[in-house]
Image (spheres, grey):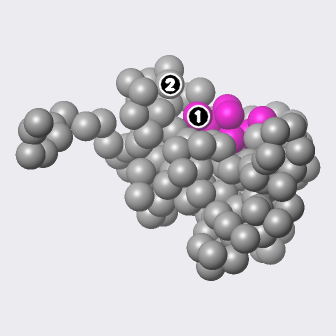
Amino acid sequence: MPAVTRNNPKLTLEGAQLVLAAAQARAAEIKVPMDIAVVDDGGHLLAFARMDGAKLSSVEIAIGKAHCAAIRRLPSAPARTGDEVNVVLSLGLSLATRGRQIPVRGGIPLQVEGVCVGGIGVSNGTEDQDVDVAQAGARALERA
């Protein structure tokens, strides 16, 4: 067993800006101004945009969704028991992590060669719109 790992992909500022630009383009296309955050694999902010008209109250939510997706390596979403949303678990995770686990959709992990290199979080639209815009950003990195 090796003592360290080598050759792990890392998200660069240029990559984060590529993700951000693709997400902004999709938000403009659907005509919904968004707050968009891109973080590294540890959930630390690399790039952010608050589009003209996006709510100030959505800034921290976008950052939180990105952080959640990156550190969990899963899309942000409510916890589930089978097909049902588990409200108690969703709120418990949020409380236990001082609000860092967001039980709201709109955060997507960013993957390169099967490795999570970060996350994108989007807020200001409906959950479906937030997910759509986040997926556009994530797809841009997959094509790079």
24 versus 132 height, above or below: below
**Amino acid at pointer 1:** Ala
Residue type at mark 2: give it.
Answer: Glu
Residue at mark 1: 138
Pick whichever, 124 or 26, lies toward us.
124
Which type of secondary structure does the marked residue at label 1 adopt?
A: helix
Query: Residue 102's spot in the image, x, y percent?
Result: 70, 62
Q: Is residue 28 visible?
A: no
Q: Residue at 81%, 39% (x, y): give it.
A: 82
Q: Which numbered dot is residue 3?
A: none
- Residue lying at the far front of the rendered structure: 82
Judge from the rendering whether residue 81 lies leftward or rightward of residue 61; answer left or right. right
Q: Residues within 10 Å of mark 1 (few under 14, many from 20)?
A: many
Residue 7: percent from left, percent from top: 19, 34
Q: Which SS class for mark 2?
A: helix
Residue range in magenta is 132-138
Q: Is residue 125 left or right of residue 72?
A: right
Q: Does the rendering let one see residue 83?
A: yes
Left or right: 10 with respect to 65?
A: left
Marks counted in the figure total 2
Using the image, determine if residue 9 lies above or below residue 44: above
> Residue under circle 2?
142
Image point (9%, 46%), residue name:
3
Where residue 20 sits in the image (x, y, percent)? 58, 45
Spot occupied by residue 40 in the image (x, y as percentages of width and height): 43, 53
Q: Is residue 61 left or right of residue 143?
A: right
